[in-house]
Image (cartoon, helix red, strand yellow):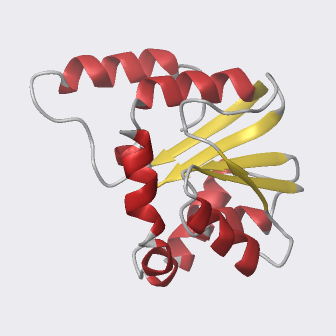
C-alpha cells in the first residue's frame, strides 16, 4: 500500500505546489504564530510540496520537511532555497533521534497517513521534553470507531500543545 501511495502522489507533486488550499499564507502564518515557534528545530511531516515547512522556516532555526514521495521533496529542495532540509520517510517511521526536535507539524496530510496513532507515537518519541505537535487536517475520524479513536488520540497527546 505504501509504494502505491508514493507512486500516486509523485505524479501530482506540481499540483500540490500550485494548490490554493495548500498555499494559504495567512492561515499558515497563523498556525506558526499559534505554536509560538522562536528558533529550534521543527519537523513538517507529510510536507507535500512544502508550504507548511516554508512558513515554519521564517521562525525556526531548522526545518526538516518529511515526505515519502521523492517528487514532493524535489519541489521542496527547488523552492526552499536551502532554508528547509528534506527527509524521505513515512509519518509512522521517522528516522530521527529521540528527543531531538522542539516541534512536529502536519497540515492537510494526516488523512493520508497509514496510522495517525503511530504518527503521534513517533512524534512524541522525537520531541524534546516540553515540545509540541501541531496537527491540522480537513478530515476527521468517521463511523463507529470515531469516538474511541478521538479518545485514544487525546490520551496520546495529553499534555502537548495542539
Q: Is residue 68 left or right of residue 65?
A: left
Q: Residue at x 73, y 27 (%)?
A: 126
What residue is drawn where x is 74% and y is 28%? 127
Q: Measured from the top left, where is residue 144 in percent x and y?
A: 9, 23
Q: Quadrant of residue 30?
A: bottom right
| On screen, residue 32 above or below 82 | above
Q: Which residue extends farthest left?
A: 144
Report if residue 14 is visible in the image. yes
Residue 57 placement (x, y as % from top left): 78, 65
Q: Nearer the viewer, residue 98 or 61?
A: 98
Q: Residue at x 86, y 55 (%)?
A: 62
Taking the image as shown, residue 31 lies to the left or right of residue 142, namely right
Q: Is residue 144 left or right of residue 54?
A: left
How many numbered marks, from 0 up?
Answer: 0
Q: Is residue 110 above or below residue 65?
A: above
Q: Return the x and y of residue 73 as percentages of the image width and height.
A: 65, 64
| Front residue of 76 and 2 | 2
Task: Estimate the x, y position of residue 101 in percent, counting from the top left.
Answer: 80, 36
In the rendered image, the vertical position of residue 71 relative to residue 98, given as above or below: below
Task: For the N terminus, give its image quadrant.
Answer: top left
In-front residue for pair 79/32: 79
Is residue 108 among what the camera can see? no
Residue 143 location, quadrant: top left
Identify whether 146 is placed above or below 111: above
Amino acid at each position: 500500500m505504501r509504494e502505491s501511495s508514493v507512486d500516486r502522489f509523485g505524479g501530482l507533486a506540481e499540483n500540490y505546489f500550485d494548490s490554493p488550499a495548500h498555499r494559504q499564507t495567512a492561515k499558515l502564518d497563523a498556525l506558526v504564530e499559534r505554536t509560538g515557534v522562536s528558533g529550534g528545530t521543527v519537523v513538517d511531516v507529510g510536507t507535500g510540496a512544502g508550504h507548511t515547512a516554508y512558513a515554519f522556516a521564517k521562525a525556526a532555526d531548522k526545518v526538516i520537511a518529511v515526505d515519502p514521495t521523492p517528487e514532493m521533496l524535489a519541489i521542496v529542495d527547488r523552492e526552499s532555497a536551502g532554508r528547509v532540509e528534506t527527509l524521505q520517510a513515512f509519518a509512522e517511521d521517522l528516522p530521527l533521534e529521540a528527543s531531538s526536535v522542539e516541534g512536529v507539524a502536519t497540515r492537510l496530510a494526516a488523512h493520508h497517513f497509514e496510522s495517525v496513532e503511530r504518527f503521534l507515537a513517533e512524534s512524541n518519541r522525537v520531541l524534546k521534553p516540553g515540545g509540541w505537535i501541531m496537527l491540522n487536517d480537513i478530515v476527521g475520524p468517521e463511523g463507529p470507531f470515531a469516538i474511541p479513536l478521538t479518545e485514544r488520540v487525546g490520551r496520546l497527546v495529553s499534555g502537548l500543545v495542539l
